[in-house]
Amino acid sequence: MSTQTFTLPDVGEGLTEAELVAWKVAPGDAVAINDVICEIETAKSLVELPSPHAGTVGELLVAEGVTVEVGAPIISFVSDAVAPATPAPAPAESGEEGGGSVLVGYGTGGGAVSRRRKPAERPVRASVGVIAKPPIRKLARDLNVDLTEVTPTGADGEVTRDDVVGHAQQASVFRNIETPEWGDVREEKLPAPVSAPAGLARGIQPAAQDDDRSESIPVKGVRKATSSAMVQSAYSAPHVTVWKEIDATRTMELVKRLKASPDFTDIRVSPLLIMARAVIWAARRTPMVNAAWVDTDNGAEIVVRHYVNLGIAAATPRGLLVPNIKDAQDLGLKDLARALNRLTVTAREGKTSPADQQGGTITITNIGVFGMDAGTPIINPGEAGIVAMGTIAQKPWVVDGEVRPRWVTTVAGSFDHRVIDGDGMSRFIADVAAVLEEPALLVD
């Protein structure tokens, strides 16, 4: 018998800290090697940590909701056996039952993650007995939804994201989820992270207020990473935005035909698919929009990529994520549609891997799903261009001298003026618009 302390590992993402979202064990619990002990959230993913030891849980050294530095002790074990030393863990990969991400490289390796029943003497949480994946449970916590009150519609009685969203009351177009009704609070502050007291973890707790008229929310996780990236982009790359209003009626007609096609029976088709193909096609004709400005020891250089890792900005319960489709230029329409579906579902379920968010070359943000006509998007760091697609709505449009109802949208593009000039970006946006107006241009 020996006491072992487990420290927060480097999860292979190059990050230095993570938030401990939820403990899956309690002091006195018996655990086996590779049993899930807790759920952590980094700036890029939600991950389940497996136990490297077998024995009994001694003490939980970090409270839920606390941000912990890599290398800080988080739990102690009274161990029957200690796992042999292992190399640095590999990036997260999906565990069984689709229950989020599980780190690989701990313990004996290759062992399946076990789902143990909680002993009767442990405190019972409100959602015990409910079948739901960790990202769905976190979404429920964020929305203050009791999972036991949610009617499940998934396979085998599993609660899905739509079930949780549908249980809430008011829509939030900014997060694309449901939120509670407005209260009497007139304002709230979103402060930058504050210095934490010395200790094992740098937990940031809501600041005390004189009354209930306001509250402070800590900036961490995805929000912290997103804000840093946006500040870096906005204040390092000179942004310029151009836009064009277009008649997208033929795109809408093509989408309708594809939905009715037997080849696309099990594939979700939307105007975003045609937009994605248009951006890939236009980037080939204007390569500089797919390039990047790189600072070097000898000055700077522009790297022109002859491939497209197409980023799709996704509003998720965890915040804004920008996963990308690798080598999208090599995909046919059907495979591109499948890739978009996988990307969207994975992002909404909180299972987007760090690798899926790295290496993007150009990004699309579909603000039309929020009912917005147009916008001036901020470029994703490491890229030179981003395209915003507005809502597609019927409007009066002049066709052959006559005013007719047509499906109209606005396409906007922001670009790094260090890399590409206005004429190049204008040609690019004109090409994107031309494809949306006449998708037959893609047949070349």
Image: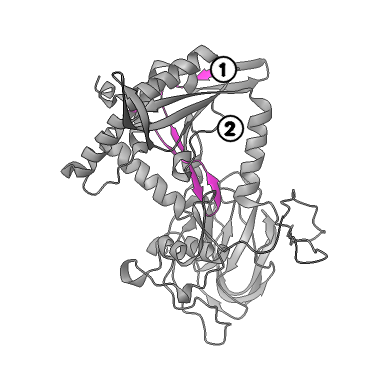
Q: Is mark 1 on a helix, strand or loop?
A: loop
Q: Please, what is the three-letter code of the amino acid marked with disc 2?
A: Ile
Q: In which quarter of the image is the C terminus?
A: top left
Q: Which residue lies furthest to the front in this view?
A: 402
Magenta-colored stretch includes residue 308 = yes
Q: What element carries label 2?
A: loop
**Residue at point 52% right, 66% down?**
140
Camera sees residue 327: no
Horizontal side of 268 relative to 385 (left or right) equals left
Vertically, is 264 above or below 281? Answer: below
Given residues 45 and 403, the one toward you in this image is 403
- Residue 38 placement: quadrant: bottom right
**Residue at point 55% right, 82% down?**
124
Q: Where is residue 230 in the image (x, y as percent from the top left)?
A: 63, 36
- Residue 233 placement: quadrant: top right
Label drawn at residue 378: 2
Camera sees residue 411: yes
Cα separation between marks 2 and 1: 15 Å
Q: Where is residue 415 in the image (x, y as percent from the top left)?
A: 55, 23
Magenta-colored stretch includes residue 189 = no
Q: In which quarter of the image is the N terminus?
A: bottom right
Q: Which of marks 2 and 1 is nearer the N terminus?
A: 2
Q: Which residue lies furthest to the bottom in this view?
A: 121
Tell me if mark 2 has few (under 14), some (14-19) or many (20+) residues whose alpha carbon lies within 10 angstroms of its own: many
Point out the stretch of residues depicted in magenta.
303-329
Horizontal side of 126 relative to 199 (left or right) equals left
**Residue located beneath label 1 in the image:** 419
Asked if the residues shown at circle 2 and circle 1 are in contact, with their CB atoms under 8 angstroms apart, the answer is no
Given residues 253 and 201, the one toward you in this image is 253
